[in-house]
Amino acid sequence: MAHLTLLAKTSCTSNPSDGISRIFIFVRVTDENGDAVTGLAQKNFDVWRGMGAEAISFVAAQGATNMPGIYAIALEKTLGSLKGQFVYTVRAKSGSGKEQAKGWTLTDLVML
């Protein structure tokens, strides 16, 4: 089975009027040769915090800005006044059957 390499960074924006925090996980996906993996969509990504799966609002490829293989994964959460460190697991997969490649990484968000 082929392997994907993921590097991720997380940021958060909040909207006090609706109480929804939008968490963005920016992830770079490369194949075994270090080449950017393009053409992935929301169905190719999974995100967990702890043991619970997170609902992905949308995934946007950043290739239009000359950054192939970089994706923005958006989550909407009601974090309210929570503070602390939150660790997310991100998994990407491409292809299917015996040709499917998978990879995962950890990323954290610190709310002060």
Image (cartoon, helix red, strand yellow):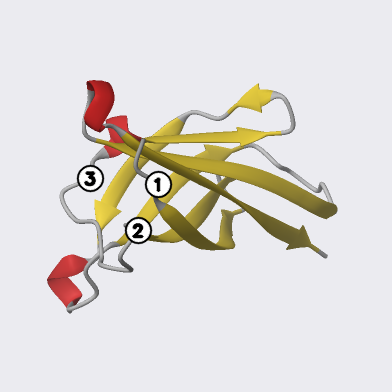
Do residues under tags 3 and 2 come within 8 Å of each other at their CB atoms? no
Looking at the image, which residue is at 26% across and 24% down? 98
User: Can you see residue 19?
Assistant: no
Looking at the image, which residue is at 49% across and 55% down? 24
How many angstroms separate mark 2 from mark 1 (CA)?
6 Å
Residue at mark 2: 32
Please provide percent x and percent y for residue 50: 74, 32
Q: Nearer the viewer, mark 3 or mark 2?
A: 2
Q: Residues within 10 Å of mark 2 (few under 14, many from 20)?
A: few
User: As rendered, which of 74 and 48 lies closer to the eye?
Assistant: 48
Comes first in the chain, label 3 or label 2:
2
**Would residue 101 appear left or right of 37 to someone viewing this image?**
right
The correct choice, above or below, for 65 with respect to 75 in the image is below
Please provide percent x and percent y for residue 79: 70, 42
Looking at the image, which residue is at 65% across and 45% down? 88
Q: Which element carries disc 3, helix, strand or loop?
A: loop
Do residues under tags 2 and 1 come within 8 Å of each other at their CB atoms? yes
**Would residue 40 appear left or right of 111 to someone viewing this image?**
left
Looking at the image, which residue is at 46% across and 44% down? 103
Asked which quadrant contains residue 20, the reply is: top right
User: Can you see residue 108?
Assistant: yes
Residue at mark 3: 40
How many angstroms separate mark 3 from mark 1 (CA)?
15 Å
Please provide percent x and percent y for residue 39: 15, 49
Residue at mark 1: 3
